[in-house]
Amino acid sequence: MTHPIDPDRDLTLSRIIRAPRAAIWRAWTDPARFARWWIPQPALCRVVEMDLRPGGALVTEMSENGGPFGPHLDACYLDLAENERLVFTNALTGGWRPAKQPFITAIITLRAHEEGTEYHAHVMHKTPDDRRLHDELGFFDGWGTVAAQLAQLVEAERN
Protein backbone atom coordinates (compact mmCIF):
# COMPACT_ATOMS: atom_id res chain seq x y z
CA MET A 1 0.00 0.00 0.00
CA THR A 2 1.43 3.35 -0.99
CA HIS A 3 0.29 6.65 0.38
CA PRO A 4 0.31 9.80 -1.73
CA ILE A 5 2.91 12.32 -0.64
CA ASP A 6 1.79 15.89 -0.15
CA PRO A 7 4.99 17.93 -0.67
CA ASP A 8 3.49 20.83 1.30
CA ARG A 9 2.76 18.77 4.43
CA ASP A 10 4.91 15.63 4.29
CA LEU A 11 8.55 14.74 4.82
CA THR A 12 10.04 11.45 3.66
CA LEU A 13 13.22 9.50 4.11
CA SER A 14 14.28 6.29 2.35
CA ARG A 15 17.31 4.07 2.46
CA ILE A 16 18.39 0.52 1.74
CA ILE A 17 19.23 -1.46 4.86
CA ARG A 18 21.31 -4.59 4.32
CA ALA A 19 19.19 -6.83 6.54
CA PRO A 20 15.94 -8.74 6.12
CA ARG A 21 12.62 -7.06 6.85
CA ALA A 22 12.08 -9.34 9.86
CA ALA A 23 15.23 -7.97 11.55
CA ILE A 24 14.07 -4.39 11.04
CA TRP A 25 10.60 -5.30 12.27
CA ARG A 26 12.12 -6.76 15.47
CA ALA A 27 14.10 -3.56 15.97
CA TRP A 28 10.85 -1.58 15.73
CA THR A 29 8.84 -3.93 17.96
CA ASP A 30 11.25 -5.16 20.65
CA PRO A 31 11.53 -2.46 23.36
CA ALA A 32 15.18 -3.28 24.19
CA ARG A 33 16.26 -3.08 20.54
CA PHE A 34 14.09 -0.01 19.86
CA ALA A 35 15.71 1.89 22.76
CA ARG A 36 19.14 1.30 21.21
CA TRP A 37 18.46 3.27 18.01
CA TRP A 38 15.30 5.41 18.29
CA ILE A 39 17.00 8.62 19.51
CA PRO A 40 20.20 10.09 18.02
CA GLN A 41 23.21 9.12 20.11
CA PRO A 42 24.66 10.07 22.52
CA ALA A 43 21.17 10.77 23.94
CA LEU A 44 19.56 7.74 25.59
CA CYS A 45 16.08 6.35 25.02
CA ARG A 46 13.85 4.53 27.47
CA VAL A 47 10.72 2.74 26.27
CA VAL A 48 7.96 3.37 28.80
CA GLU A 49 5.21 1.58 26.87
CA MET A 50 5.04 -0.35 23.60
CA ASP A 51 1.59 -1.89 23.14
CA LEU A 52 1.82 -3.34 19.63
CA ARG A 53 -1.78 -3.17 18.43
CA PRO A 54 -4.00 -0.54 16.84
CA GLY A 55 -4.88 1.83 19.66
CA GLY A 56 -1.87 0.73 21.70
CA ALA A 57 0.52 3.24 23.18
CA LEU A 58 4.08 3.99 22.12
CA VAL A 59 5.70 6.09 24.84
CA THR A 60 9.40 6.93 25.02
CA GLU A 61 11.55 9.14 27.19
CA MET A 62 14.99 10.55 26.52
CA SER A 63 18.05 11.55 28.51
CA GLU A 64 20.65 13.96 27.18
CA ASN A 65 24.14 14.31 28.63
CA GLY A 66 23.43 11.72 31.33
CA GLY A 67 20.65 13.84 32.80
CA PRO A 68 17.26 12.66 33.99
CA PHE A 69 14.85 11.07 31.55
CA GLY A 70 12.08 13.32 30.28
CA PRO A 71 9.22 13.06 27.77
CA HIS A 72 10.05 12.31 24.15
CA LEU A 73 7.16 10.63 22.32
CA ASP A 74 3.61 9.87 23.46
CA ALA A 75 1.90 8.20 20.51
CA CYS A 76 -0.68 5.67 19.43
CA TYR A 77 -0.30 2.85 16.93
CA LEU A 78 -2.82 3.04 14.11
CA ASP A 79 -1.80 0.04 12.00
CA LEU A 80 0.72 -2.79 12.16
CA ALA A 81 1.33 -5.28 9.34
CA GLU A 82 4.16 -7.59 10.41
CA ASN A 83 7.38 -7.11 8.42
CA GLU A 84 5.63 -4.60 6.12
CA ARG A 85 4.19 -1.50 7.77
CA LEU A 86 3.96 0.32 11.06
CA VAL A 87 1.82 3.45 11.46
CA PHE A 88 1.73 5.68 14.54
CA THR A 89 0.66 9.18 15.44
CA ASN A 90 1.15 11.60 18.27
CA ALA A 91 -2.24 13.13 17.45
CA LEU A 92 -3.56 10.37 19.71
CA THR A 93 -2.19 8.69 22.80
CA GLY A 94 -2.78 5.07 23.81
CA GLY A 95 -6.40 4.00 23.85
CA TRP A 96 -7.25 6.43 21.03
CA ARG A 97 -7.21 9.41 23.46
CA PRO A 98 -6.74 12.83 21.77
CA ALA A 99 -3.31 14.34 22.38
CA LYS A 100 -2.72 17.86 23.67
CA GLN A 101 -0.28 18.83 20.93
CA PRO A 102 -0.54 16.66 17.81
CA PHE A 103 2.35 17.00 15.37
CA ILE A 104 2.92 13.93 13.16
CA THR A 105 1.59 10.72 11.75
CA ALA A 106 4.33 8.39 10.54
CA ILE A 107 4.09 5.47 8.13
CA ILE A 108 7.10 3.17 8.18
CA THR A 109 7.18 0.83 5.19
CA LEU A 110 9.49 -2.15 4.70
CA ARG A 111 9.85 -3.65 1.22
CA ALA A 112 12.04 -6.52 0.07
CA HIS A 113 15.05 -5.37 -1.92
CA GLU A 114 17.82 -7.36 -3.60
CA GLU A 115 20.31 -5.92 -1.08
CA GLY A 116 18.05 -6.39 1.96
CA THR A 117 15.18 -4.03 2.75
CA GLU A 118 13.95 -0.77 1.33
CA TYR A 119 13.11 1.32 4.41
CA HIS A 120 10.77 4.26 3.93
CA ALA A 121 9.55 6.78 6.51
CA HIS A 122 6.64 8.99 5.43
CA VAL A 123 5.92 11.63 8.07
CA MET A 124 2.73 13.62 7.64
CA HIS A 125 1.90 16.95 9.26
CA LYS A 126 -1.39 18.78 9.74
CA THR A 127 -0.24 22.00 8.08
CA PRO A 128 2.54 23.28 5.83
CA ASP A 129 3.75 25.33 8.81
CA ASP A 130 4.11 22.15 10.92
CA ARG A 131 6.03 20.48 8.08
CA ARG A 132 8.31 23.50 7.75
CA LEU A 133 8.89 23.55 11.52
CA HIS A 134 9.79 19.84 11.56
CA ASP A 135 12.18 20.41 8.66
CA GLU A 136 13.79 23.36 10.47
CA LEU A 137 14.06 21.33 13.68
CA GLY A 138 16.25 18.87 11.78
CA PHE A 139 13.97 16.15 10.40
CA PHE A 140 16.51 14.90 7.86
CA ASP A 141 19.40 14.97 10.30
CA GLY A 142 17.42 13.39 13.17
CA TRP A 143 15.42 10.79 11.25
CA GLY A 144 18.46 10.13 9.04
CA THR A 145 20.65 9.55 12.09
CA VAL A 146 18.21 7.13 13.70
CA ALA A 147 17.74 5.28 10.38
CA ALA A 148 21.54 4.89 10.23
CA GLN A 149 21.57 3.68 13.85
CA LEU A 150 18.78 1.21 13.01
CA ALA A 151 20.76 -0.03 10.01
CA GLN A 152 23.91 -0.39 12.09
CA LEU A 153 22.04 -2.42 14.72
CA VAL A 154 20.31 -4.86 12.36
CA GLU A 155 23.24 -5.20 9.97
CA ALA A 156 25.56 -6.03 12.91
CA GLU A 157 23.07 -8.62 14.22
CA ARG A 158 23.05 -10.22 10.79
CA ASN A 159 26.82 -10.77 10.79
Image: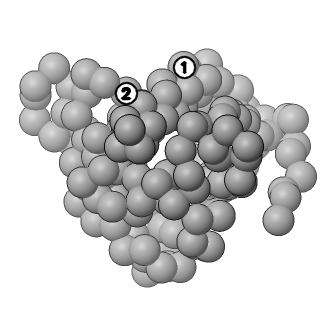
Toward the viewer: 53 or 82?
Answer: 82
Q: Secondary structure at mark 1?
A: helix
- Marks 2 and 1 sit apart, C-alpha to C-alpha, by 9 Å
Residue 100 visible in the picture = no
Q: Which residue is mark 2?
A: 40
Indicate left or right for 159 with 54 as reference: left
Give how far across and how far down residue 151 sits, in percent. 48, 35
Give how far across and how far down residue 71 sits, in percent. 28, 45
Residue drawn where x is 33% and y is 61% of the image: 30
Dot placed on the residue nearer the N-terminal end, 2 or 1: 2
Q: Quadrant location of the N terminus? A: bottom right
The image quadrant that residue 87 belongs to is bottom right
Residue 157 visible in the picture = yes
Indicate left or right for 107 with 39 as reference: right
The image quadrant that residue 47 belongs to is bottom left
Name the colour scheme: one colour
Whether residue 66 is situated above or below residue 31 in the rendered picture:
above
Residue drawn where x is 44% and y is 37% of the image: 155
Residue drawn where x is 85% and y is 35% of the image: 8
Which disc, if any, is residue 141? Answer: 1
Give how far across and how far down residue 75 sits, in percent. 45, 60
Residue most extreme to the front: 159
Question: Crowdedness of circle 1 by 10 Å Cα count: few (<14), some, many (20+)?
Answer: few
Label 2 with label 1: CB-CB less than 8 Å:
yes
**Looking at numbered disc 1 in the image, what kind of residue is underneath it?**
Asp
Whether residue 120 is situated above or below residue 15 in the rendered picture:
below
**Looking at numbered disc 2 in the image, what kind of residue is underneath it?**
Pro
Residue drawn where x is 37% and y is 74% of the image: 51
Whether residue 82 is situated above or below residue 14 in the rendered picture:
below
Q: How many marks?
A: 2
